Amino acid sequence: MFTGLIESTGTLLATTPTAGATRITILAPVLAPRLREGDSIAVNGVCLTALDIRPDNFSADLAAETMERTTLAELYPGSTVNLELPTPAGSPLGGHVVQGHVDGTATLVSLIPITPGADETDWRLRLALPEELLRYVVSQGSITVDGISLTVAALHENIVEIAIIPHTYAVTHLATLQPGARVNIETDVLARYAAQQYRKPATFELTEAYLLANGY
């Protein structure tokens, strides 16, 4: 489990096709020394397994589904990625519960400074979300964008607005993104469970037999 608090950024060194998968290698001098073979690590919000660990980099294999569901297939050598190690049991949850299971992707509409020209300023991030994810997103609720735990500031139809503080802008890869870029989205797992709990089967029909069986 992760919390969406990015520990470091890394740089994609290479993408290599392998038998049945695609291997990526990431330069991560801050986190690589803390990894052991088989450890989990979130890369742009995608939970991956660290392999072939070296002093300043590691590799991970991407299954076909990961390539299709996330933006990792769009990375190129030199791409900056957000990195986070799993949260140890008993640690404070500084962000929110993040599984590293991407629900889909969104498109960056804009990332605009609130005070242009200032040394430090908040930013306003606007994303266009696909229709199927909107049901899990609410104003002031949590959302994970490329692994970053963020809070929804406003919703306008399919556009999600998020306030970005200077620290988040400085320690993540957001500064490298341009309008039109796709980002990985993981909606709040609690919202997904709530929606599943209250979703009626498509074949549900209120009948006399149903009412009798349930004590009416």
Image (cartoon, rainbow, N blue to C red):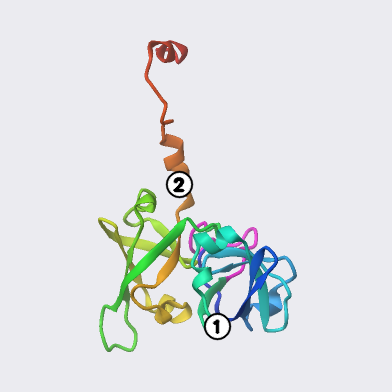
Quarter where residue 60 is shown:
bottom right
Residue toward you, 97 or 101 = 101
Label 1 environment density (alpha carbons within 10 Å; few <14, some 14–19, many ≥20) = few
Image quadrant containing the N terminus: bottom right
Q: Position of residue 13 (x, y in %)?
A: 60, 83
Q: Amino acid at mark 2?
A: Arg
Residue plotted at (73% across, 65% down)? 38
**Contact, mark 1 vs mark 2 (Cβ under 8 Å):** no
Magenta part, dominant SS: loop
Task: From the image, tell me which residue sits under label 2.
Answer: 192
Q: Position of residue 166 (x, y in %)?
A: 38, 79
Q: Which residues are magenta?
A: 84-97
Residue plotted at (43% across, 15% down)? 210
Instruction: Tell me how far mark 1 sits from mark 2, CA to CA.
Output: 34 Å
Q: Is residue 194 magenta?
A: no
Residue plotted at (73% across, 75% down)? 52
Residue toward you, 57 or 21 = 21
Q: Which mark is residue 77?
A: 1
* 198 to 214, vertically: above or below: below
Q: Is residue 88 magenta?
A: yes
Query: In the figure, is residue 42 to the left or right of 173?
Result: right
